[in-house]
Image (tube, grey):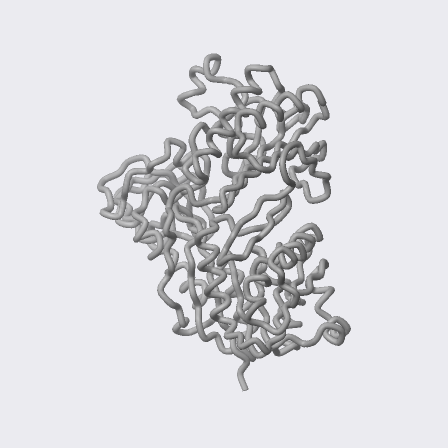
Amino acid sequence: MKGKILEELVVIDMADDGKAVCKHEGLVVFIDKAVPGDVVDVRIKKKRKSYCEGEIVNFRSYSESRVSAFCKHFGRCGGCKWQHLDYAAQIGFKYKIVNDAMVRLGKIENPPLLPIIGSELTTFYRNKLDFSFSDRKWLTPEEFLNKEELDGPGLGFHMPGSFDKVLDIDECFLQPDLSNQIRNEVKRYSVEHNLSFINLRNKGGLLRSLIIRNTLFGEWMVVVMFYEDLKEEREALLNNLAEKFPQVTSLLYVINPKANDTMYDLDIITWKGNDFIIEEMEGLKFRIGPKSFFQTNSTQALKLYQITREFTGLTGEELVYDLYTGAGTIANFVAHQAKKVVGIEYVKEAIDDAIINSSINNISNTSFFAGDMKDLLTEDFFAIHGRPDVIITDPPRAGMHLDVVNQLLAVKAKRIVYVSCNPATQARDLELLKSIYSIDKLQPVDMFPHTAHVENVALLNLME
């Protein structure tokens, strides 16, 4: 079927990867840039056993749910794939994604799903963005015709599915506008002073990546990652940033000559200000370092944590385990309602932040431990620190390791509150846990408008 054009396909659904869904003679066809209700002609690009991937060649009619995309980079950078879909429709499809995962993967009949909580902000809601440098920015097919005029270095986002193609970004609607100003100034200065951008295939070059973080508390962090260690050029760029942006309270840099961009094993150097920024929620202050994990939508994170705390049903007498605790945000958030909270996290630097977060908030009933979850959750650990009455777990997108799930089944805490950024892996884990736990509440929370991503909080109670 490759190359064949299928006419007048009706878009019927949105998939959990952000693509739109059509059907042709029972065969599922996935396409980009469409919304349910659109009628389109589609050229097939790839044929798989049970589905096809296609591209739109013509719109026959447009859906009532379609709105105009607000970003000129829409459809290229790979982010905000749903910005052409009305926000009310977006959260409706996210609700459906959670429900379908629970039924299909979790084998949960009639999931106890509460109405989804939408985001107050649908633009400028993120508190962290990562940008990449490239000595040759990606050009559209139209731009490529004027390659000599438009070719040059880029600073922006990786193109979907490509490590070495970077789309140059001059305006992004994800983070408050100071982020745009900082990024554009970094590029302007670097081009004007002939600072080299990294070649992502062959390596080589000074500038590698740029991380910008901010908080509702009004603090900003900028981390510049350099590939080559060129002292004079590096210091000139950092001094320019410090002079132009006094709002930046934490200006840091790292030299990374490795094959990958990860910096968890590298030393981060403070050039100006603190080596952290502060976020505040319900009067609690949370220190966020360059390696810290923190929910990237602070306003919605507060709602997520409030729901998590409500689901725990704490009375002040419970021993709580907070698994995948990160910088201890949830652990410290619920500590005043618990007898004691034990937080466990793989990244040691995050545990260091968690301990500091307890200290600066005068919280004395928390303990934090760094290590692999499946290795730490042992009978010896329980013998020292006690068996939990309530477990909060907030794993990464891959969900919990099977050994961790089995340990939870063995521990038999009275209650588990499972926070997830991936309903599919959460449903997979719930399917195992429901052998001894009832799934009593499911609360979807939209943290990422204009994307297919959705958080979900599940309340599990031990069955008698």
The answer to whether residue 443 is above or below residue 264 is below
Which residue shows up at 72% across the image and 72% down it?
A: 385
Residue 171 at least partly seen: yes
31 left or right, relative to 214: left
The answer to whether residue 57 is above or below residue 389 is above
Looking at the image, which is closer to me, 229 or 164?
A: 229
Looking at the image, which is closer to me, 445 or 243?
A: 243
Q: Quadrant of the C terminus?
A: bottom right
The answer to whether residue 85 is above or below residue 226 is below
Looking at the image, which is closer to me, 58 or 300?
A: 300
Looking at the image, which is closer to me, 122 or 427?
A: 122
Residue 326 at least partly seen: no
List x then y, in percent, for residue 267.
73, 39
Which residue shows up at 73% across the image and 65% down it?
A: 376
List x then y, in percent, for residue 286.
57, 53
List x then y, in percent, for residue 198.
63, 25
Q: In which quarter of the view is residue 91 placed?
A: bottom left
Q: In which quarter of the view is residue 207 placed?
A: top right
The answer to whether residue 413 is above or below residue 231 is below
- Outermost residue, front side: 362
Which residue shows up at 53% across the image and 66% down it?
A: 418
Q: Quadrant of the N terminus?
A: top left
57 left or right, relative to 232: left
